[in-house]
């Protein structure tokens, strides 16, 4: 029974970390609309849950603190970091593509004149 509660705790830490990373990123990189917000939220949570353990272990190893943290802390930290990075990357790419689309439209208008 202890293994089940530990696994449930790690899943809860992954989920909470992924959602927290997504929420933190909203504070400094606001989405331009509901569709972008929903996409970035979904990608952030999925990346946080999927890559949380590996990211947490990598961060803790690089900082030389892995032996001082509990597994739940590693997963929480990694999930938040993976989610935060995913949100930032999606926001950057969407704004880049949006700018490229506007530049293409402007060029097409100039060519037609």
Image (cartoon, helix red, strand yellow):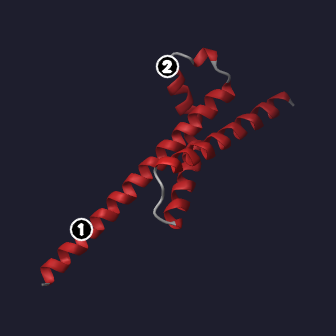
Q: Residue furthest front?
A: 27
Q: For marks 2 and 1, give the CA distance.
A: 42 Å
Residue 85 is situated, as x and y percent measured from the top left of the image, at 47, 42
Q: Residue at x 81, y 34 (%)?
A: 4
Q: Residue at x 21, y 73 (%)?
A: 106
Residue 45 is situated, as x and y percent measured from the top left of the image, at 59, 49
Number of other residues with Cα within 10 Å of mark 2, as a class: few under 14, some 14 to 19, many 20 or more: few
- Please tell me whether residue 106 is drawn above or below residue 7 in the rendered image: below
Image quarter of the N terminus:
top right
Q: Quadrant of residue 9?
A: top right
Foreground residue among 112 and 75: 112
Residue 65 is situated, as x and y percent measured from the top left of the image, at 56, 17
At numbered mark 1, what does the secondary structure look like: helix, strand or loop? helix
Q: Which mark is residue 78?
A: none
Q: Are marks 2 and 1 in contact (CB under 8 Å)?
A: no
Q: Earlier in the sequence, mark 2 or mark 1?
A: 2
Residue 111 is situated, as x and y percent measured from the top left of the image, at 13, 79
Which residue was labeled with disc 1? 103
Number of other residues with Cα within 10 Å of mark 1, as a class: few under 14, some 14 to 19, many 20 or more: few
At numbered mark 2, what does the secondary structure look like: helix, strand or loop? loop
- Please tell me whether residue 109 is drawn above or below residue 14 in the rendered image: below
Q: Residue furthest right?
A: 1
Which residue was labeled with disc 2? 63
Instruction: Please tell me how many numbered marks the rendered image carries.
Output: 2
Foreground residue among 32 and 15: 32
Q: Residue at x 49, y 66 (%)?
A: 33
Left or right position of 86 against 98: right
Q: Residue at x 38, y 52 (%)?
A: 92
- Please tell me whether residue 42 is drawn above or below residue 106 in the rendered image: above
């Amino acid at each position: 029974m202890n293994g089940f509660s530990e696994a449930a705790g790690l899943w809860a830490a992954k989920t909470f970390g992924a959602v927290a990373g997504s929420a933190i990123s909203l504070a400094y990189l606001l989405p331009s609309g509901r569709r972008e917000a929903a996409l970035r939220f979904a990608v952030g949570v999925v990346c946080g849950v999927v890559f949380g353990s590996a990211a947490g272990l990598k961060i803790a190893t690089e900082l030389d603190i892995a032996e001082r943290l509990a597994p739940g802390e590693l997963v929480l930290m990694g999930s938040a970091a993976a989610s935060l990075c995913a949100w930032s990357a999606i926001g950057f790419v969407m704004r880049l593509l949006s700018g490229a689309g506007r530049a293409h439209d402007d060029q097409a208008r100039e060519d037609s004149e």
